Image (cartoon, helix red, strand yellow):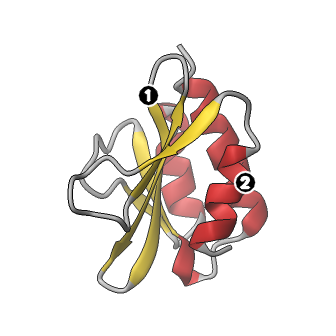
Amino acid sequence: MNKQEIIKYCATLPSTFEDYPFPGDNITVAMKHIKNKKWFALIMEVKGELYLNVKTDPNYSDMLRSAYDYIIPAYHMNKEHWNTIVVSRNAEETIIKELIEQSYELTKK
């Protein structure tokens, strides 16, 4: 998936919006819930690679990092609760979508 496909997929989830949270940065995108304003996905470019931060169950985080070489501890976020998917390393679309949905659910409240 590319950046626009990820944004488009996130926007299909109920009551969400696209935000640019950092002044002067029109590249980094946070996908947020309308009601609580919490983000469930952070899309950014780091060292020429497309990164996607998603919230994960801490019990599941280590397993994901062990199973997929493109999932690493979260870039600039709490590494216990967040993971980074390095999308540009041929991350599987089904895994990306599944983890976006899980993050969405974990951040609803």
The tag earlier along the polypeptide, 2 or 1, is 2
Report which quarter residue 25 is drawn in: bottom left
Q: Position of residue 57 (x, y in %)?
A: 52, 32
Q: Residue at x 63, y 81 (%)?
A: 90
Q: Which residue is under mark 1?
A: 38
Count neighbours of disc 2 (C-alpha within 10 A) and say few if under 14, some if 14 to 19, many if 20 or more.
some
Q: Residue at x 40, y 36 (%)?
A: 81
Residue 9: which numbered mark, if any? 2
The amino acid sitting under disc 2 is Tyr
The amino acid sitting under disc 1 is Lys
Q: Position of residue 33 (x, y in %)?
A: 55, 28
Q: Position of residue 1 (x, y in %)?
A: 68, 73
Q: Nearer the viewer, residue 55 or 14?
A: 14
Circles 2 and 1: CB atoms closer than 8 Å: no
Q: Mark 2 and mark 1: span between their CA atoms?
A: 17 Å
| Secondary structure state at the residue bearing disc 1 | loop
Above or below for 50 versus 41: below
| Secondary structure state at the residue bearing disc 2 | helix
Residue projecting furthest to the top: 109
Q: Residue at x 37, y 51 (%)?
A: 20
Q: Nearer the viewer, residue 19 or 9?
A: 19
